[in-house]
Amino acid sequence: MASPPDQPGGSIDLMTDRAHSARAYDYLMGGKDNYEADRVIGDAAAKAWPAVRLAVRSNRAFMHRAARFAADGGIQQFLDIGTGIPTRPNLHEIVQGITPQARVLYVDNDPIVLAHAAALLVSDPRGRTEFLRGDARDPASIVASAPARALFDFAQPLSVSVIGLLHFLDDDTALRLVRTLLEAIPSGSLIALTNITRELDPETIDNAAAGYAGGGVRTYLRGKAEIADLFLTGLDVVEPGIVVVHRWRPESNSEFADVPDADISVYGVVAHKP
């Protein structure tokens, strides 16, 4: 069963006057849970990067496939960092469709996400779905949180998803996040990551990043070598390795099959902890 999200007492500042990456993502996904500041940077990104809406949908489709891969491999515990506005199907719907008893913890720091979580993230009654208001910049507090400790058996494999988040974190913060999560999970666990790259179309992606920066949201664009060096040391990378997200084990009827890699410009990877 789902439980109410963790939230402090008193009113919550929804910060609607400031752009937030999760709400801009929701806007680009065609959602309605966003505000003028979010739409401004979303429109700026779309003007510079005409295929950005395809890119965000492809990024989410990668998350679905990575989650299925983990569930098909027998993993029953899932930690999703930087959840964003709930958009069906959500991760728990994917994995509980395979393993109904799967347990899922969603983590995000946006109060809009927090406000939607209790109503929309409803678990299969045979499993559990929880939501934690947590900050990726403080990963130790996520791992040590009461919901994480109550939900997970950290002696058993977990699947960790960090999708659409790393490109909003500087190298030190992103590395601390990934390393802290990896230290907390046992051998046999999986981690799935995505990161926007400028390697395939530098001018377009740089201009899109400038649009986000104009709204106060900085991005950190990484190439394959940077992703490997920062995040994958000591891990066993699952084939086909670090690839543009729509090339990672695509479904036969994928809507993205004929989309050029440069249009997507988001790398994805799944790795095992040995």
Image (cartoon, grey):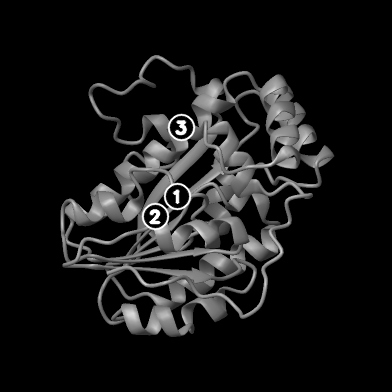
Q: Is residue 110 visible?
A: no
The residue that disc 1 covers is 86
- The tag earlier along the polypeptide, 1 or 3, is 3
- The tag earlier along the polypeptide, 2 or 3, is 3
**Which residue in the rendered view is the most extreme toward the top?**
258
Identity, as a three-letter code, of the amino acid under mark 3: Arg
Residue at 21% x, 67% y: name it: 127
- CB under 8 Å between discs 1 and 3: no
- CB under 8 Å between discs 1 and 2: yes
| Residue 84 placement, left or right of 206 | left
Residue at 83% x, 38% y: name it: 214
The residue that disc 2 covers is 120
Residue at 58% x, 26% y: name it: 52
Q: Nearer the viewer, residue 217 or 93?
A: 93
The residue that disc 3 covers is 57
| Residue 77 placement, left or right of 133 | left
- The tag earlier along the polypeptide, 1 or 2, is 1
Crowding near pointer 1: few (<14 within 10 Å), some, many (20+)?
A: some
Residue at 57% x, 67% y: name it: 177
Residue 51 drawn at (x, y percent) = 57, 20
Q: Is residue 17 visible?
A: yes
